[in-house]
Image (cartoon, helix red, strand yellow):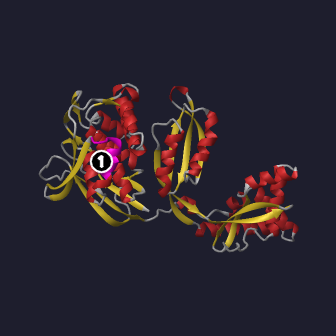
Amino acid sequence: MTHLWIDASAGIAGDMLLGALLDAGADLARVQNAVDAVLPGAVRITTTEVRRAGLRAHKADVTPLAADQPHRTWRDIRGLLGDAPRAAEVFARLAAAEAAVHGVTPDEVHFHEVGALDAIADVTGVCAALDDLGVTTVSASEVAVGSGAVRAAHGILPVPAPAVAELARGWRIRSGGTGELATPTGMALLRTLAATCEDLPSLTVSAIGVGAGTRDTPGRPNIVRVLIGTAAAKPDRAALREPSIQETMTQGTTAQAATTQAATAQGATAQGATAQNATVHEDAARTAMAQEAIVLEANVDDLDPRLWPGVISALLAAGADDAWLTPILMKKGRPAHTVTALCAPASAHAVRDRIFQETSTLGVRSSRRSKAALARTFVRVEVAGHPVAIKLGHAAGRIVQAMPEFDDVAALAAALGITQREALARAAQAAAAAGLTLGATPPPS
């Protein structure tokens, strides 16, 4: 897993982050090609090595190849970014912030400074650079936003600019100096790409990049730094906590209960099975492997509910480990759903893109988590000549969970003309007869 940490302690802007990623090793030609795919023949990206308060840095410059660029609405930009979903997500977040500031809908927002070709190129270029560097997860420091006032299309505005302040909701910020240190484009990139606001995490560093802003302020380097490397897994201590005997006695499912009944019929006592169950779960808590995971979620209030089963299936097909819906109540009393997907960092971009494709959302939230996962094996047993897959969860050489796959159970019930409840019990009995019981040694994979 390749992790990127953004040091925005001196501020952030789109061109500064792009310069830092190019300095860290992103291929300029590939970045230019990605920008050309969105803006054919419209801009040229160049880099130069500069000094900022005595520190070396890369300055990324985007030169428009056509004059008199028009102001653009979010609808215009969304059309340009149809083949760049991650860049579209950045601008969607930016449009939502501008809309909140001006009291209009996102589609009515007219981008001035951020709507120019150079800003679209910055956003598209940053997203392309991340892909080229193989970055799978991103976090960032608190952001220095500056102080004083800045001249914008609407006149003199206080710093942080209203859109920057809106984008900073939920993120740590500080003044950090005079003038505008964080731009709306830079803040939208950081908030879209970074899942966590944190100080430098535990990281085996493989690359460092330094991107320069336009101004050279004495005594305060006007730079953005990025550190890229392999992140150490952060164990979820709550997930790895050893459950009490009372907790483990209440765990389990209908199939596990059926397995215990079958074991009892073969001579084991119910008390002995319960004690074994508790011991197995306690050992599993010690040996389950902590893994990095990404949680992606979006609130949706305008999707035909008949589409949701297909959405969930599409997210699973895109690489999500799990996906689900939660009913919520949004503003103005609108009933809605939160769609959530859990996936490995390597699958996050594909799953996030699928959320955009399959739903009507304009933004997807992401957060980095850790989970404790048992090793898994599938073993097939036969019930009245019909195959049923048994999913085993195991740790430390012992079976911890044994669960018939429900699709096979449903097919078994239909084939035999029995209820699914009876089919589930018969599948659990077949698993027990095959030795697939809690505490047993799992068969070799």
Q: Which of 221 and 302 lies nearest the eye of the viewer? A: 302
Q: In percent of the image, x 55 and y 28: which residue is there?
A: 334
Q: In percent of the image, x 62 and y 42: which residue is there?
A: 310
Q: Which of 169 and 191 lies nearest the eye of the viewer? A: 191
The kind of residue tagged 1 is Val
Quarter of the N terminus within the rendering: bottom left
| Other residues around mark 1 within 10 Å, as few (<14) / some (14–19) / many (≥20) | many
Quarter of the image for residue 252 reads bottom right
- Image height check: is 334 above or below 292? above
Quarter of the image for residue 139 reads bottom left
| Tally of numbered tags | 1
Q: Of helix, strand and loop, which one carries label 1?
A: strand
Q: Where are the magenta residues, as a range?
A: 31-41
Residue 171 seen anywhere in this rendered image of the structure: no
Residue extending farthest left: 218
292 magenta-colored: no
Q: In percent of the image, x 25 and y 58: which residue is there?
A: 23
Residue 105 seen anywhere in this rendered image of the structure: yes
Residue that badge 1 annotates: 143
- Residue 86 placement (x, y as % from top left): 41, 45
Residue extending farthest front: 41
Quarter of the C terminus within the rendering: bottom right
- Residue 10 placement (x, y as % from top left): 24, 50
- Image height check: is 322 above or below 201? above
- Residue 348 placement (x, y as % from top left): 48, 52
Task: Answer with left or right where residue 58 lies relative to residue 376.
Answer: left
